[in-house]
Every structure is written in structure tokens, then in C-alpha cells.
Amino acid sequence: MTKSKSILVTGGAGYIGSHTVVELYQAGYLPVIVDNLSRSNQSMLDGLHSILGVHVPFYQADCCDAQKLVEVIRRHDVACVMHFAAFKSVNESVANPLLYYRNNIDSLVAVLEAMRVTGVSDLVFSSSCTVYGQPDHIPVDELAPFKRAESPYGATKQMSERIIEDAIQLGLRAISLRYFNPIGAHPGSLIGELPIGVPNNLVPYVTQTAIGLREKLTIFGDDYNTPDGTCVRDFIHVCDVAEAHVKAMEYLQQQPSKHFLALNLGTGVGVSVKQLVETFIRVTGVNLNWVMGPRRDGDVEKVYANPELSASVLRWKSSRSLEQSLTDAWSWEKAIRKGI
Ligand code: NAD
Ligand code: WQD
């Protein structure tokens, strides 16, 4: 199949980027990956090869290097940039804030600089619901004000959105996708999330406990003002998130110059931590060892998306269930442990 347009996917060897590479390719585009593999590895590229049956172009390079990005954009006549490359651990960002400001902000500025130099106008950016903090109203919509970020990581996402909003004056069109809690994996278990060290996020911790890598899961707090006392989140299948990127890019192509929009990517359904754990046990049949523990510092009590704007603008909504997401997360965990 001849591919119509090349799309630069920074961080395309990572969790969400790799799933988006699959969606792009299957929609008829040629994804071109730039990733320094600082938080990923060759196995993700191998997984992409197995799914797609071809090697998509890959450059092991740092996205803070604008000149390298210019070279790649020119070589492939790139039509749009999807910028996933960033560090994403809240805890690590508290311990090492400068690393986060350096990587997440420098890489974005370098991407924008490379777009300016080469005349590429369209950017799809990976933002996060973390920009809202604990919103005053839930489901939270895109007009909710940013609260002071709880972590340097969250601050980089707030700053990034501001930088992009300013940069559209250069003639860009940009969309910032605020992901809620992406979970799960591609159904064939060839790509998925590769947590480094002990996971902070709930679902990798659940699957690693289920497979015996961790002794027990601790649920952080059951005294919140929620139906069962545990925190509430909006868990969305990573393939739904990936599909939305293709829609976002196609939407941007119809917009006038200097267009900026931020959109929530969530299901619109709040699920408590305890509900998620119970659902995991039910769909996998695994006897998960879990205990109730104290609250974790900095946790938001409850947050889930108002998905109406993304539904109307992108003509997209999430379609995969929580059960499907957890089944796929579990299959992925079993697949990676077999490979070790
Ligand atoms: P990930 O760590 O799996 O993927 C990020 C990829 O970017 C990795 O492959 C890493 O090697 C690469 N990378 C990092 N810095 C780089 C640099 N300077 N140059 C080149 N490559 C670099 O993370 P992910 O979960 O796929 O997240 C992708 C994006 O989505 C990030 O911007 C993240 O902040 C954002 N996000 C993630 C979540 C989530 O829960 N996973 C939620 C909201 C937003
Ligand atoms: C979910 C819930 C925990 C682990 C983080 C980032 C956010 C975004 C998504 C990138 C919370 C509870 C967790 C455990 C638990 N990422 N939990 N036991 O906190 O919603 O958001 O990831 O942008 O920026 O902050 O996700 O998966 O860490 O936690 O009880 O071992 O699970 O307390 O209520 P969170 P999470």
C-alpha cells in the first residue's frame, strides 16, 4: 500500500506513541518515529514490526535536538507532528524537577522550532488531565481553570499548553489532547506499557502483583468522599486514545491557520480504584492479593472527563470497556514475563 502522508511520531516507541503508530499506519499514513529509547526499548519496535508487517522509519535521536528533527522532517516530507516524547513519572519529577523541565520543555520547544524552520503546520500534543488538579466540578470540561500543579511533571504539561498556544501565532494549527488514565494494550500483546522499576500507576501495579512480581497491591485510602471511599478515575483503553489522535490530525487539516484547541480524552465514566480491582479479579479469575492502606500524598480525590467536546469535534468516543482494557492489560503482562 502506498502511504499518503508521513507523520512524525516523537516518542513512538513508548506506550501511547506505539499504539498510535499502529492506528496511523492502518489508516493509510506513514508514521516516522523519533525516540531516544530512554524510556523504552527495541522490543516495542519489534512488536510494531510484527503487527504491521513492515519496519516503519525509526530514528534513535533526542527530540531536544531541533536540527535532527529538521533533517527527519525534510527527509520524509512530514505533514504533521505528533509529540509524545516526554518523561511522565510524577514521583520522579518531584525528586528530579530539572530533569523534567529540561526534557519536557526543551523537547517541545525543539519540535516547534523544527516545525517553524520546515514549514510543517500541524501539531498533536500529548497533554494530561493532570493540568486540572482537583477540579471544582466533575465531569471536568476543557474550560475548567488550571489549578496550581501538584508536581513538576504536571507543571510541564501546563507550561507546554501555554507554549503551544503562544506558538500558533507562527501560523501553526495545534491540538492538545488531555488524556485521563490510559490503560490496557494492543489485543495481540505485542506492544504495551513497559513500566520502569516499581510502577506508580495502578494497573501495572495490579498486573505485576497478579503475576507474582509484587507481593500485594495497596489501595491508597478508603476515606475519600466517593461512593466506596476510594479514589475515582477515568480509565480509557490505550487503543481508543490512539484512534483519537488520527481523528485529531484529520480535524486539524480542516482548520484555519493559528488554530489551537485542547480536548479531553476520557470515557466520561468515573470508576473507583476498588471497582477496578474487583473488575480485574472478575475478568481474569486471578486471586489478587490486595490490602487497604493510607492515602498517597498528592492524590486527586475524583476526576473524570466530560467527553462531549471531543465527541462533537472529533466524531470520536471511546468504545472499549473496562473489562476489555483489563483483559488486555493482563494478557500483555503475561506476554512480557514470558519474554524475560
Ligand atoms: P512512555 O514513557 O511510554 O513513552 C514516552 C517515549 O518518549 C519513550 O519511548 C521515551 O523513550 C521517549 N522519550 C522521552 N524523552 C525523549 C526525548 N527527549 N527524545 C526522544 N524520545 C524521548 O510514555 P507514554 O505513557 O507513552 O506517554 C506519552 C505521552 O503522553 C507523554 O508526553 C506523557 O506525559 C503523556 N501522558 C501519558 C499518560 C499516561 O498515563 N501514560 C497520561 C497523560 C499524558
Ligand atoms: C490511580 C489511582 C491511586 C497505585 C497519574 C498521573 C497523571 C496521569 C495519569 C500522566 C489513584 C491509586 C495507584 C497503587 C493505588 N499521567 N493507586 N495503589 O494518580 O490518576 O494519575 O497517571 O499524565 O498525571 O498523576 O494514576 O495510576 O497513579 O493512580 O491505590 O499501587 O490508583 O491512589 O487513586 P493517577 P495512578
Image (cartoon, rainbow, N blue to C red):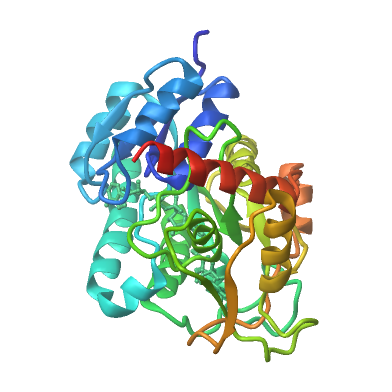
* Position of residue 159 measured from the top left corner of the image (x, y, whole percent): 41, 70
Residue drawn at (73%, 59%) of the image = 279
Q: Which of 215/121 is in front?
A: 215
* Position of residue 187 measured from the top left corner of the image (x, y, whole percent): 61, 34
Q: Relative to 198, is 98 on the left or the right?
A: left
Residue drawn at (34%, 60%) of the image = 87
> How many numbered marks appear?
0
Q: Is residue 320 visible?
A: yes
* Position of residue 28 measured from the top left corner of the image (x, y, whole percent): 56, 19
- 187 w.r.t. 218: above or below: above
Q: Is residue 266 visible?
A: no
* Position of residue 179 measured from the top left corner of the image (x, y, whole percent): 58, 58
Q: Which of 211/245 is in front?
A: 211
Q: Relative to 216, is 98 on the left or the right?
A: left
Residue drawn at (73%, 51%) of the image = 283
Q: Quadrant of residue 106?
A: bottom left
Q: Quadrant of ligand 2?
A: bottom right
Residue drawn at (61%, 43%) of the image = 328
- Where, quadrant-wise, is the C terminus in this rendering? top left
Q: Which of 222/81 is in front?
A: 222
Name the outermost residue toward the top.
Answer: 1
Q: Which of 291/91 is in front?
A: 291
Q: Quadrant of residue 331?
A: top right
